[in-house]
Image (cartoon, rainbow, N blue to C red):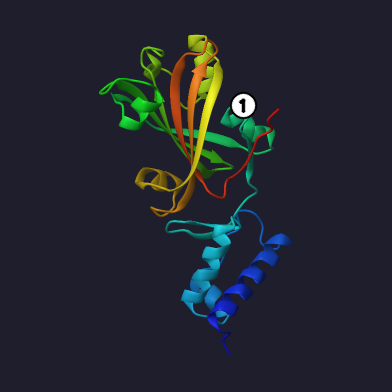
Amino acid sequence: MREAAPRAVTLICQALQEQIEHGLLSSGCKLPAERKLSEVFDTTRITLREALLQLEAQGLIYREERRGWFIAPARLDYDLMKRSHFHAMVRDQGREPSTRLLSARQQPAPAAVCEGLQLPPLSSVVQLRRLRCIDQRPVLYVEHYLKPAVFPGILEHDLSQPLTELYLNQYGLRYGRVCFEMTPTALHVEAAAALKVSVGSPGLLITRVNFDQDGRLIDCDLEYWRHDAIRLSAQVG
């Protein structure tokens, strides 16, 4: 006999969480199709989906469009106070990073970018859109906005490499002060498509406004992270 829906959801969550904690369902493992899982737990697809959504909200599993459900890997530790670029941060934690350039162009700056970079209306900026992966899993969609006067000719360079290294090697610039703003968000169309999730899926938006070693405002980044991909930390003082 099938359990009442609320109790069934709890039992499904507990059963799958136990399998994950004991390593029987390992990181990256694909779960059976929802139809099969509903048969295993003798429940309806609606009840099963509610349990899966709860586990997704906890960061234990994740869904990819048209591919199904997977066991989530360990979160990346993201120390906001440590000056490190994405590739170095990922490798330091024993994992494999990669970056793919999605687009690069000079364009009129969006209003929010004009405000963040203290630019007058209708100013031009260089926009870079990049997708970043950990162990081949897309976890971060980034929009970089650069002041063209600070980075002449930057579109001619390899823009899949860490910008930290490109800035230093080609322009003699190092990051100085950084201002962070973090906001839970629903992933918009471009971010969701890059991260292979549904539009409106939960994410974390980290906005970074960056200054160089001389205190000059040089660029800003809009980082759209999968909500289950990172663990934020900071030590002050």
Residue 178: image x %, image y %? Answer: 54, 24
Percent across and percent down for residue 141 are 45, 39
**Secondary structure beneath label 1:** loop
| On screen, residue 194 above or below 38 | above
Quadrant in the picture for the C terminus: top right
Any part of residue 23 in sight: no
Identified at 60% across, 79% down, the residue is: 7
Relative height, residue 217 to residue 26 (above, below): above
Q: Quadrant of the N terminus?
A: bottom right
Residue 87 appearing in the image: yes
Q: What x and y, as percent, mark residue 213?
A: 55, 12
Measured as percent of width and height from the top left, residue 31 is found at 57, 64
Nearest the viewer among 210 and 39 is 210
**Residue at 50% across / 18% down in the picture?**
211
Q: Read off the residue under disc 1.
A: 84
Name which residue type carries label 1: Ser
| Vertical order, 78 against 165 (above or below) | below
- Mark 1 Cα-neighbour bin, 10 Å: few <14, some 14–19, many ≥20: few
Q: Which residue is drawn at 50% across and 33% down?
A: 99
Quadrant location of residue 52? bottom right
Seen in the image, is 19 located left or right of residue 104?
Answer: right
